[in-house]
Amino acid sequence: MRGFLSLHTRTGWLAFATLTALLLIAVPLLNALPADSALHLPDYLVPLLGKFCCYALVALAMDLIWGYTGILSLGHGVFFALGGYSMGMYLMRSMAGQGVYRSQLPDFMVFLNWKELPWFWHGFDQFWFAALMALAVPGVLAFVFGWFAFRSRIKGVYFSIITQALTFALMLLFFRNETGFGGNNGLTDFKQLLGFSLAEPGVKLGLYWISACVLLTVYLLAQAIVHSKFGRVLTAIRDAESRVMFCGYEPLYYKLAVWTLSAVLCGLAGALYVPQVGIINPSELEPTQSIEMAVWTAVGGRGTLAGALLGAATVNGLKSWFTVAAPELWLYVLGALFVGVTLFLPQGLIGLVRRLRPGKTEEVRA
Amino acid sequence: MSTKSRTFFLSSLAGGLALALASGAALAADTIKVGILHSLSGTMAISETSLKDVALMTIEEINAKGGVLGKKLEPVVVDPASNWPLFAEKARELLQKDKVAVVFGCWTSVSRKSVLPVFEELNGLLFYPVQYEGEESSRNVFYTGAAPNQQAIPAVEYLMSEDGGAAKRFVLLGTDYVYPRTTNKILRAFLHSKGVSDDDIMETYTPFGHSDYQTIVADIKKFAGAGKRTAVISTINGDSNVPFYKELGNAGLKSTDVPVVAFSVGEEELRGIDTKPLVGHLAAWNYFMTIDTPENKAFIEKWKAYVKKNNLPGGDARVTNDPMEATYTGINMWAQAAEQAGTTDVDAVRQALGYQTFKAPSGFVEQLDAKNHHLHKPVYIGEIREDGQFNVVWKTEGPIRAQAWSPYIPDSAKKVADWTYPWVCGNCTEPRFK
Amino acid sequence: MCRLLRFLLLACALGSTLPAFAVSFDDTITHLGADPQSLRSAVGELAAANDPRALIFLEALRDGRVSFRDGEVLIKDGDTLKRARDGVAVTGEPGSAPLLNNAVRRGIDSALTRLQLTSPDRAVRLAAATAFADRPVRAAEDSLRAALAAEIDQEVIHALRLALAPIELQSEDRGKRLAAIRTLADEGEPRVIAVLDPIAKGDDAELATAARSAIDAITDRQWFRDQAGNLFYGLSLGSVLLLAALGLAITFGLMGVINMAHGELLMIGAYATYVVQNLFRSYLPGAFDWYLLAALPVAFLAAAAVGWLLERLVLRHLYGRPLETLLATFGLSLMLIQTVRLIFGAQNVEVANPSWLSGGIQVTAQMVLPYNRIATVIFAFAVLAAVWLIFQKTRLGLRVRAVTQNRGMAAAMGIDTRRIDAMTFALGAGVAGLGGVALSQLGNVSPDLGQARIVDSFMVVVLGGVGKLAGAVAGGMGLGIVNKFLEPAMGAVLGKIVLLGFIILFIQKRPQGLFALKGRAVEG
């Protein structure tokens, strides 16, 4: 217990508690206020905040593999999408008979004149199975991919580029109608989750709440990991892999473990994301989508978990804001943000705060 | 971990919330807000930007005539950035935050599918202006683009006629996504019903954004070399059309040998292609810029003036096309319906919309169908001219009623889209209230 | 004068074969309507009319020079308007144009070809006969036989025989049928298999054997042609990939900069081509065909200038941090895309092929090698050679190689490494601009042009091996050719997926690509 408490300083825990209170208590309370109140949190913001929580989860996963281990993945969209598709498949199966064709099969299969469910769709009518798959499929894929890549000592930009090839190949695969995941339209028009109607504001709030809980839990978990001995080996691999090897560690297993964990977290984020936005389709697999995920982490500040959260919130907040306020300009703002952060804020926004108050920076580790 | 960083994070989050709250509260009451949901960036900007422009033009025109119900229309333009989840998010924002009376938007089927649950959940009103694969009918959506029977099937009938070249063999060529797949499925069933056997149908798909059509064009030549008259039915999407047509022109596949009829290539797309080698190839639409009617002349003049006044990119070269006409017609119909209903309340306007007629630039009085929410539209077949416009070589006698559910797909053949009493259902096989 | 001579010659040539039922040219022209239906029947009548004026009229109709005014059919000949029925010049403007459709155009083509069978010009006759051999028309049988009887040139006779062979297959005379089968075995196109098939399955043993071996011969020939076609398509696709990736091979391969804005440099090259084209169209319409040559230096300089700016303003601060470069250049690419979108609009812009790049070489009836494809292959290797020369034979190249191999040592030798970096990057960007010129001739020019190419370009460079030009060539050509051989077997979509899977596996096996740079020069 003492070890756990020592993850943060006292002020650190205080800030964490404030964030927890804000996300888990303040948001539902503000949402519950009458609609004409000035402090009322409108309903449309709830799924948006839930979406941000999922993105922040991805940024955390990205930070573990890139910020702490120094491996840049340009294919994390794959794991996110696989988690999302698993959940989407459950949602499609759970509404069997309620689609427009009143068929036991998902609508797009009726559309394509398929007579029975493809083998890989079996089992997804059970929530536990889908939830398991949302974690297991990205995990297994990452494990196999990572095993080969790390064993061949593929590093740096080479690794980044083959992960990009992976996401591109899977995007083309999922685009095909014949692959059996709804092609370009993807999976959509979901009705209910575990019997709860997804159109209910209460259910949306619940989903948001669960996402926030998961995010905070994973944040603590990640803190525990990066402060453990395992985490320190990861940082050592990032800084000088050959020296780690000379010290008698086998980097392969460390890299593989954190890579797989990162993928599983992405799958989890994807599974939480899909019921809240109501659609999963191959555009999540576009290479630029995965680059954006890396950008969240970089903007916030690599190598600090709070930075990942901050980066995901800032970039996506700006994106949501500018696509309404100044649609013509948002690519400029986003582009300038990336350039500015890499040029002037190598430590990300977190680093900016530190630079402003250099004297008062506290030690990271307790 | 710095404490400061954490406070910064929290305060930025709180700041964001406060901003969002403030803008939500500032609702102006003396205007009617209408949403425009078209991608202005990303891959679909290429097509959708024009629709945003023409929507703003139409709104300006309506405002100049005094607006709707004595109030001015206030467009709320958002950019879903060709990102499908963002479409749903923006739709929710338009309906819940901006409280728009109606939304004009979407181009791709996936964007429509993405926003559909949002409109149904919040009882919003969406006008969808693009031709699509059908197999859908929603209480909350009015479809002003063509269903397959208003575009694809007449085009194939034309190809099989003496005038169209009496084609006996067909290449169904498309980008691998839902619209081409479904359209080709309907066409295959239709061709079977006309006695064309599977041996005489070649179905090929290319990946999204495909840019190398050498093999495909060679395959078409081979297939066409079997002796029977062959025609190509292309549902290639957006950007891939340019490399396809360039390859076609340079490989010497002339319209007299193998005519290509396209469902996604209009005036706007041809602007990006050197059309000289393509003369004689065909497109099927419900509107062409060359249609010679007073309504169309006025429409084009307004558009040209609007482009000039706002100094839009492209200038004089800007053209009008089918989805633009559908957007124009849709907005006008909505304004008429709101006037008639005396309110912008969605349920009242929906009732009024079902019986609106409008003399569209296509030269026909078009009517919205109260039952299936689709527009009755005429069908034109046009041949590509050297100047990138189309010569109308064939047209229907009058507007055709859309079949939201295709009779050529076994599972949807018995479905009825009827949003009037006593059906009130978009996909029933029997009335809901008997 | 020239036309008159042609009239007379044609009249002589046609005199012997004039059929009795021919409708008179004057009748047809007087009752001509402007709608497709009546045009089509008129064209059919004119094809059989054997009147020299018919040829002139049909050519004019095909070229869009015919118009209707006050019940009179007029033909525009150069700057003068003439009446179709007697060739008398009239004054005033052309009238309304007739409405052609494909059925009419096809009728005109076939009628013209029939009339051309009796042309005094040997080349015209040969072309007409070959056209019939490629595309048999039943109705032309009489014309073909008449032409064969009158023909003296061996080559034309040969083409006519080939054109008649599918018809002869139905002949009553067994000898003729056998001869026709042999002719087709030697030169027939795959389309005649449908006609040969029933004979091969027929009762007559000798004919059946001959037909079977003819089918085999045709199929074999087609197989070789298909493979040759695939090879050409692969080379051509490979050249495109190479052109798109060559600039990246320089910036990424030699400098280690992951330039996600590389695609946008291609786009800038393509837009530069567009601008040059428009300038030529406005100011030098006479020299329009040569705008592409002028576009090459413009595109190179425009892209190089943008590249130089990027390097000076952003990238120089990020050397040695490849992953940060990736993010910064991604941001830059977003800004470049939006800038172009605001200037030129989001839509595709039209970049026309100059006339010398339109069309292609007809190899067989089924196979055409388009000029723009051939030019791309040549251009790719020309650019490659130029880049190679720069690196191997110039002082700049020497210094670039020195900096690549050992930066510290190069600096110690007095090389201004910063300047060399900027120049190298500008060179890579300029080469990307040249790639953009080539892409503008093959595909669409839009703000998103670069995004579609960036992944492929990285694959080419990584597959080939970083740091060697030969690697980029092997990577580009390898991907192009394998892709084109996979495509017929499994379709475009699956082919591409399989190829990407193959790249991923290959890099596991050979992380340094096909051509590894020896030593420890480039390590991520």
Image (cartoon, rainbow, N blue to C red):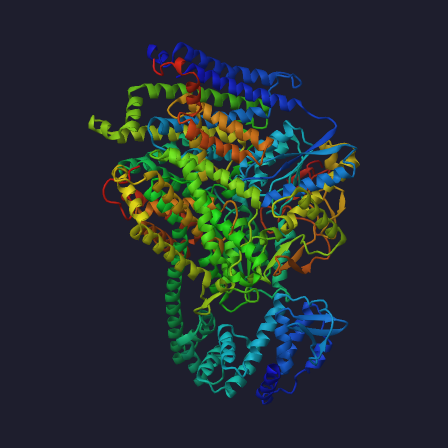
Which quarter shows the N terminus of chain A? top left
In the rendered image, residue A223, in percent from the top left (x then y), is placed at 37, 19
Between B309 and B230, the residue placed more toward the observer is: B309
Relative height, residue C206 to residue B82 (above, below) = below
Residue B55, by quadrant, is top right
> Which residue does the image show at 40% across and 44% down from the upper left?
C426
Between B87 and C441, the residue placed more toward the observer is: C441
Q: Give left or right: position of B389 versus B200.
A: right
Q: Give left or right: position of B255 versus C414.
A: right
Which quarter shows the C terminus of chain A? top left
Residue lying furthest front: C414
In the rendered image, residue C472, in percent from the top left (x then y), is placed at 34, 50
Residue A16, by quadrant, is top left
In the rendered image, residue C413, in percent from the top left (x then y), is placed at 25, 40
Between B81 and B287, the residue placed more toward the observer is: B81
Q: Give left or right: position of B236 versus B34.
A: left
In the rendered image, residue A166, in percent from the top left (x then y), is placed at 38, 41
> Could one spot residue A310 in this view of the protein?
yes
Relative height, residue A217 to residue B418 (above, below) = above
> Could one spot residue B44 in this view of the protein?
no
Number of marks present in the image shown: 0
Relative height, residue C325 to residue B24 (above, below) = below
Residue C20, by quadrant, is bottom right
Between B137 and C347, the residue placed more toward the observer is: C347
